[in-house]
Image (cartoon, rainbow, N blue to C red):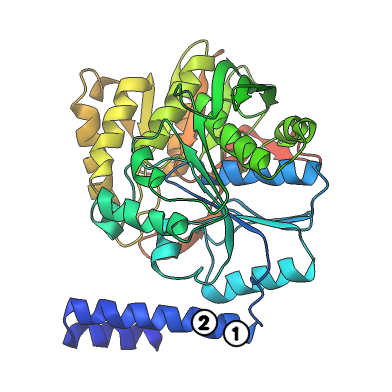
Amino acid sequence: MKDRVVKGVRKVLPSRAVSGLEEAYRKARVRAVAARYGHPARNLRVIGVTGTNGKTTTVNYLNEILKEAGKKTAMFSTATIEVAGVATRNDLNMTVGSTVRMQQFFRDAKAAKVDFVVMEFPSHAIHQHKLDGVPVEMAIMTNLTQDHLDYHGTMEAYAEVKGRLFAGNPKYIVLNRDDEWFEFFDKFTARDQKITYGKHAESEAHIDDIKLYRKGTEAKVTIDHQTKLELATNLPGEFNTYNMTAAVAAAYLLGVDLHDIIEGIANLEAVPGRFERVVENLPFDVIVDYAHTPDGLEKLLQAAKAVTKNRVILVFGACGDRDKTKRPTMGGIAANLADRIFLTDEESYSEDPDTIRHMVYDGIEDVKGGAMKTTELPDRREAIEKALSVAKKGDTVLITGMGHEVYRIVEGNKIPWNDSDIVREILGKTKTTDGASSAN
């Protein structure tokens, strides 16, 4: 009924009038739903993380640090939802749930008497007012790179929406000093304190040194030119060092003990669909990752190459009904950095999957030798199976785009799917209750 009304209104009214009505409706709805649940977000200490890439991992790092410090937390991330230590997989296929779902989460967090709520603030949710009225005590920025231009139109408009989180005058602000859009976000002021992180000489949480390994990363971080931390994480990749340091800087502002910060970082064993090592005890590595933006794919491939002895074999595609301009860009990145490519379907939504693949392939073809190392296999399971069959000792197979997600939307149909499960099925592996893998 609601969809029919919306379509009818859009047919008879100019776009500006429709946008105005949508804006008014969304604002009124979030107020009404919050009132129905008794405004549960009020008086909660909310830490909001925004940015294009790294939100989920940063949220998970900070959640672990706070728990190590003896705090009771609630977390809402793209991959996992957790309240007072009870975690469930986020099976919504979206970062933020409906207005009702979010008020239910805040209600549960309030009932559990949590000390902190740590959550992602994606641009769509900010623009659509789903989180209006949520008192953000700390706002954290990871980075801003190309994504969602189908929705926002320009990078400037995208940045403006992200900036609304910081324009609310939070008590604390945490910014990536190395990000291209740092100056834009640095203009916002914090009520109490702002801190920056990165390799830039002026970063207050300065990344001094990074050592990359197959199964983790070590980094040295100096805060305020005097507090030195030696950190070890189970998550590989330089990009994860940035996510880790964002969480460290945030915890430092909150006055968390340094020992708890170090232990909290070490406690995070994995994040579903984020450089997730699927099966152990193979001659090659199999990694599933959510990377679905040009910057995310590039950083993932660079991280994989840094810790891979032989070839990096990539299985990837692009999502339908989303920013089309990034497809050839991602194809070019894949062709430049991967040693072997299996181009396949991801989620086509209402688009023709052949058209999506062809746009990605255009970018691959533009790179010298790109077409020669690419095999196009529309069937995603077949593409994964083929990649696994050609992998040799010392290779890394990267399967990107779906990450933690538990279903795909193909030509309008919702199909159960999880890349990690598919890999285990193909390899004849099952996951035991303690997370280990065993042969069937």
The residue located at (60%, 85%) in the rendering is: 35
- Tell me the kind of residue under disc 2: Arg
Residue 199 x %, y %: 48, 23
Residue 252 x %, y %: 67, 38
**Mark identifier at residue 31:** 2
Residue 266 x %, y %: 73, 30
Q: CA distance from mark 1 to mark 2?
A: 6 Å
**Mark identifier at residue 172:** none
Residue 219 x %, y %: 62, 20
Crowding at mark 2 (Cα within 10 Å: few <14, some 14-19, many 20+): some
CB within 8 Å, label 1 to label 2:
yes
The residue located at (27%, 76%) in the rendering is: 19
Callout 1 secondary element: helix
Question: Is residue 218 shown above or below 117?
Answer: above
Q: Quadrant of the C terminus?
A: top right
The residue lying furthest to the top in this view is 309
Crowding at mark 1 (Cα within 10 Å: few <14, some 14-19, many 20+): few
- Tell me the kind of residue under disc 1: Ala
Question: For this rendering, which residue is in front, 117 or 411?
Answer: 117
Q: Quadrant of residue 288?
A: top right
Callout 2 secondary element: helix
**Mark identifier at residue 35:** 1
Question: For this rendering, which residue is in front, 102 or 246?
Answer: 246
Question: For this rendering, which residue is in front, 408 or 83?
Answer: 83
